[in-house]
Image: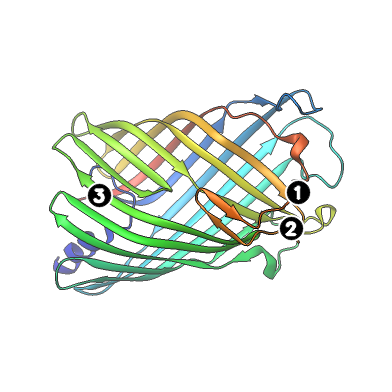
């Protein structure tokens, strides 16, 4: 029992949480974007549909009372489809897969604070002719400080060697229970939630998610080009407990800055930060195929441990 309690206390700081009351172990979700027209300057007429699916599994291993070896694996699928005929060198439809492993040590310090150091290899691909170019390597480091029992803030950095070059994201890991009803959590600037606890079964609130990812195209027609996906999703959500440990969550909102830009494999940048890029002189190969931002719905089924 003591080992289980230690596990819960430490891993809560790195896992998806709802009002600091549950620890998500397995999540299966689907993403459904509303069909959108191509941008006005595009020569194409018609609409494009975005669909996605995600599975996330968390498997921590307790080493001792102060150390956890944390493991999570995340699979994501993005499918962008339309009925338009494009030139053979442009990816259409777009079908992308991401497999991301996070593994590393969580070290609890004597003052109650903690250090998290994770190695994060990725397979980002269209599952065609996979080779070493489809793998990416990076990691995350966070120092988490406990300010009081209702507030923990972690400060850190994420690094990933994307297909377009190095990507560095400063991180703030926030867990703030403002009252018995209101809380805020997230790994900023990647994702966040503001939650209102309606009752023991229902939470509602606002959320955002935004992360740049890149995928190597192995199909010979695309000559090892890559796709850079961007989107910032903002909306409302509701999470309902079906039975103990099993929850269903629905989200509805709007995608901003969404794009699936295709670039030549040799077209890279010097450095990417959340709000700026350096040495970015790339030419988007599928610029005429950009489609508009739009509304989306997101449904997820979650198995969680109640704390």
For residue 178, which quarter of the picture? top left
Q: Position of residue 47 (x, y in %)?
A: 70, 25
Classify the position of the N terminus by image quarter.
bottom left
Of label 2 and label 3, which has the lower sequence position?
3
For residue 3, which quarter of the picture? bottom left
Task: Residue 126: give its label.
Answer: none
Q: Position of residue 124 (x, y in %)?
A: 62, 58
Q: With respect to residue 107, does 300 lie above or below?
A: above
Q: Secondary structure at mark 3?
A: strand
Q: How is the image coloured?
A: rainbow
Residue 13 can be seen in this image: no
Residue furthest out toward the front: 279
Residue 162 can be seen in this image: yes
Residue furthest out toward the bottom: 64
Q: Secondary structure at mark 1?
A: loop
C-alpha span from label 1 to label 3: 40 Å
Which residue is at the front of the view, 18 or 264? 264
């Amino acid at each position: 029992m003591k080992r289980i309690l230690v596990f819960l206390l430490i891993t809560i700081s790195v896992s998806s949480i709802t009002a600091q009351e549950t620890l998500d172990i397995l999540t299966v979700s689907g993403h459904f974007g509303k069909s959108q027209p191509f941008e006005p300057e595009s020569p194409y007429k018609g609409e494009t549909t975005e669909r996605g699916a995600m599975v996330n599994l968390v498997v921590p291993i307790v080493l001792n009372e102060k150390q956890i070896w944390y493991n999570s694996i995340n699979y994501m699928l993005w499918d962008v489809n339309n009925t338009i005929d494009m030139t053979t060198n442009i990816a259409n439809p777009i079908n992308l897969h991401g497999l991301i492993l996070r593994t590393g040590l969580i070290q609890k310090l004597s003052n109650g604070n903690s250090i998290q150091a994770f190695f994060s290899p990725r397979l980002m691909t269209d599952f065609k002719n996979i080779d070493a170019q489809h793998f990416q390597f990076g990691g995350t480091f966070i120092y988490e400080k406990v300010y009081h029992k209702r507030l923990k803030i972690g400060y850190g950095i994420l690094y990933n060697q994307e297909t377009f070059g190095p990507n560095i994201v400063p991180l703030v890991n926030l867990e703030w229970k403002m009252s018995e009803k209101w809380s805020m959590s997230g790994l900023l600037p990647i994702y966040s939630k503001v939650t209102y606890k309606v009752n023991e079964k229902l939470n509602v609130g606002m959320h955002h998610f935004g992360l740049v990812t890149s995928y190597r195209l192995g199909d010979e027609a695309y000559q090892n080009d890559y796709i850079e996906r961007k989107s910032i999703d903002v909306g409302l959500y509701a999470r309902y407990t079906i039975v103990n440990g099993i929850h269903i969550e629905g989200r509805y909102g709007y995608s901003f800055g969404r794009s699936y830009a295709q670039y030549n494999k040799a077209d890279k940048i010097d450095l990417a930060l959340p709000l700026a890029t350096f040495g970015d002189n790339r030419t988007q190969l599928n610029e005429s195929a950009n489609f508009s931002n739009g509304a989306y719905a997101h449904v997820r089924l979650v198995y969680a441990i109640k704390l």
